[in-house]
Image: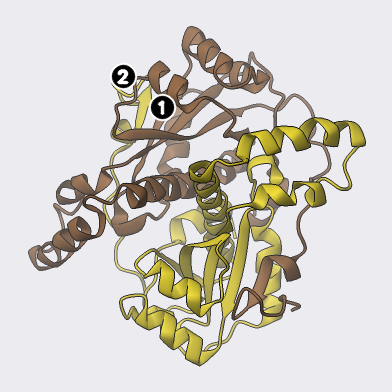
Chain colours: A brown, B yellow
Amino acid sequence: MEFSETVQQRHSIKSYQPDKEISDAELKELMQEVVLSPSSFNLQHWTFISVRDTEIKGKIKDAAWGQEQVGTCSVLLVICGKLNAHEDAADIYQGVDQGIQDKVLPLIKGFYDGKDQLQRDESIRSASLAAMTLMLAAQNRGWATVPMIGFDPEAVSQLVNLKSNFIPVMLMAIGFKKEEPRPRSYRRPIEEVVKINTLDGPGLMG
Amino acid sequence: MEFSETVQQRHSIKSYQPDKEISDAELKELMQEVVLSPSSFNLQHWTFISVRDTEIKGKIKDAAWGQEQVGTCSVLLVICGKLNAHEDAADIYQGVDQGIQDKVLPLIKGFYDGKDQLQRDESIRSASLAAMTLMLAAQNRGWATVPMIGFDPEAVSQLVNLKSNFIPVMLMAIGFKKEEPRPRSYRRPIEEVVKINTLDGPGLMG
């Protein structure tokens, strides 16, 4: 599909056809596009837990304000961020020139080590970039999605066995929509969203 | 351009043609796609500061490890998140049925009020979703981008007059690439990135 059409057609969808399936092979193809998203120092802080197990899905639904789509979507993803992803840098840069490794690896260590807030920020940032690619790439395949932040992070972490170095960044339902989306919700006008040179500068008129 | 082609072609580009311009009208068209990104409760925590002023750009470059692309890109965006975006909920839901407003507005207040970490997380999450749409929508127009996190957030905040209720989430250079990108950097394999049902479950094979 044309890129602009994909962006225009994507809506958050909460009503799914529960009998429709997305195979692991299809999910894998989707993910091959998702991982092309950028991340700081290419650390790829993201990990996706694909939940199809009905029991786990049900318990996550309970921990997510009972939202219907958690149960009815074809695949529920728990999109996670790895707080200490910077510790994987040596693995990630393995194939890179030694000269670059010698420069970048200490830089990464110095940038992240001991900085808890930055590590959390980065996990959320990278996982969110990947999540947006995922929503668009799913739309391009005719699949609907909805990102969710309304859940108990500790309960969800327990249900999918997250260790303390991972956080759940958002839930994502993927599936086949049951009905057409409602008209798009209000968007703030561009002159309010884009400011020229400083936050108190004029709005972008174009 | 086809969606998949757009995703495949996007690379982070650090080398730009400094004489090439992107007009405000073109930037506005781009942003009209960007704001179609989703955000929790549709709060649209994002604000974009479009920096073309050479002096401010130069100072931001100094605060961003001297990265060349800050100076040579056509438009430098400081992508910001509004920590207290939930306080705008009444404005955003103005056009919505009163019954929905009565339900959603107190929910939003209860969800965010007094929760500093959540407010920060949400600002980063929403701004990052929009940032990914921006990179792809720019690619679709033949423009290159690079997201940057290597900068002094306090210095940049001062330079673009951010108030204390805004944080800079990332810098984004947009422009015309000077040379073809290097081969894509390493991506972790899908079986490592996607786990089945729990974090310690098997990897997705497809």
Q: Label 2: chain?
A: B
Q: Position of residue B85 (x, y in %)?
A: 66, 52
Q: Amino acid at mark 1?
A: Ile
Q: Does residue B76 appear in the picture of this structure?
A: yes
Q: How far, Cα to Cα, is label 2 from label 1? A: 9 Å
- Residue at screen point 15% across, 54% down: A95
Q: Amino acid at mark 2?
A: Gly
Q: Are marks 2 and 1 in contact (CB under 8 Å)?
A: yes
- Residue at screen point 69% across, 40% down: B41
Label 1 element class: strand
Position of residue B128 in the picture relative to residue B92 (left or right):
left
Position of residue B121 in the picture relative to residue A41 (left or right):
right
- Residue at screen point 60% across, 67% down: B48
Q: Label 1: chain?
A: A
A96 vs A183: above or below: below
Q: Position of residue A113 (x, y in %)?
A: 21, 52
Residue that label 2 marks: B201
Point out which mark residue A49 bears. Answer: 1
Position of residue A153 in the picture relative to residue B189 (left or right):
right
Q: Residues within 10 Å of mark 2 (few under 14, many from 20)?
A: some
| Nearer to me, B16 or A102 | A102
